[in-house]
Image: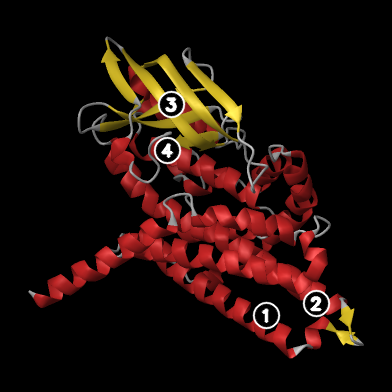
Amino acid sequence: MSNAHDYQEFRSNLRRLALDKIEPHAAAYDREVRFPEQSLEAFKQLGLVGLAFSETAGGQDGDVLAQCIALEEIARVCASSSLTLMVIWAGLVPVAKHGNKELIETVIKPAMAGGTVASICLTEPHCGSDLFALRTNAKREGSDWVINGQKRYISNAGRSDWYTVLARTGEKTFGLFSVHKDDAGFSVGKRESKLGIKGSPTADLHFENCRIPAFRAIGDETKGYDYISESLTWTRALIGAQALGIAQGALDQAVNYTSERQQFGQMLSKFQMLRGMIADMATAIEAGRTLLYSAAEAIDEGYPDARKLASMAKLFCSDTAMKSTVDALQMHGGAGYMNDFPIERMLRDAKITQIYEGANEIQKLIIAKDVYDRNAERSK
């Protein structure tokens, strides 16, 4: 994999795009609770939807590091916009990797133009991190699959064209299925009211004898859990990138505010205690970036420690995002508590990165298991 320094021009282009086309709308997405349509249009300028797909599928064949940099720079100004892109990838990449030719022609190739929105549908009312407990089921009936069940907290819900759905196909087997927004028996529930990332719609999905053609089963209908387990390592790194971007954005805001605000006859940036906080934030962000990029390399190269590193990156970067936004708001004083400044939005947006794609407590269990397993191997 190329060194991160090789991506400087790519990062610079993303930074300009984010500042020119995304940041001006970020506060409105949050305040008006509306989907970031302008951001979706901006993504088309750099072909960002295609970044996660192979050239044979019409994509840009970007590696995980490039994807992380993209989400990092977008989240630096708007977490809702970064989530929109990430969820499109999460919903479509399993189709591109495991789907049959007809499904790829139907779903993936048209999506490379950048106008398709997608969702990944795992969580249910009674199960979050415990996917083995899911109850949504898919049964084969002639030349169709019939899906029944309910999904919860689905990002991009109501705006997506395609939904990638994990459903039980047997007592101990699961399949992945592509459901279109217009399929009979499919409906979207009430939009949730959330603390943060308000530009990204979240809602329940309902499947009531939702009938889809057989070719929309993604790969082997008994290996859906394996496909998702593989995908989660990648998406956890992407969450880490989103969180890192939020943390960097918080640092940007803190530096700008303390460089312009005076107290006791001098700039806030001259106060040693605030300088100490800035130094701690900058150090944690740089440490998170190094860990994240190591995880990206491990995923791209298929290293055995990729899963552990992805969990470490997700854990560390999301914790860093939470602490950085809290500290940055503190440096704004009372002004930070008002929505006149972006930092209060960033603080609200940061919290979800510690929860979704496997809560951080789950990441700690994954990391600890790897540590103990490696120790047991050395002791043999």
Q: Which element carries disc 2, helix, strand or loop?
A: helix
Q: Disc 3 to disc 4, how far (Cα)?
A: 9 Å
Q: Assess whether mark 1 and mark 2 are in contact (beta carbons under 8 angstroms).
A: yes
Quadrant in which residue 344 is drawn:
bottom right
* Mark 2 / mark 3, whichever is N-terminal: 3
Query: What residue appears at the point 49 percent right and 26 percent down from the top-left corner?
Result: 205
Q: Dot 4, how many residues are within 10 Å of its Cα: few (below 14), some (14-19), or many (20+)?
A: many
Q: Earlier in the sequence, mark 4 or mark 1?
A: 4
Placement of the N terminus among the 4 image quadrants: bottom left
**Disc assigned to residue 150:** 3
**Kind of residue at badge 1:** Ile
- Tell me which amino acid carries mark 3: Gln
User: Is residue 72 toward the left or the right of residue 296 in the image?
Assistant: right
Q: Which structural element holds mark 4?
A: loop
Q: Measuring 56% from the left and 25% from the top, which residue is drawn there?
A: 189
The residue that label 1 is drawn on is: 278
Residue at mark 2 to residue at mark 1: CA–CA distance: 10 Å
In 3D space, how far apart are the residues under numbered discs 2 and 3 (Cα atoms)?
A: 48 Å
Marks 2 and 3: CB-CB under 8 Å?
no
Which is more foreground, mark 1 or mark 3?
Answer: 3
Residue 67 visible (yes or no): no
Label total for image: 4
Mark sitting on residue 258: 2
Q: Is residue 26 left or right of residue 72?
A: right
Is tag 2's residue or tag 1's residue first in the polypeptide sequence?
2
Q: Residues within 10 Å of mark 2 (few under 14, many from 20)?
A: many
Disc 4 marks a residue whose amino acid type is Thr
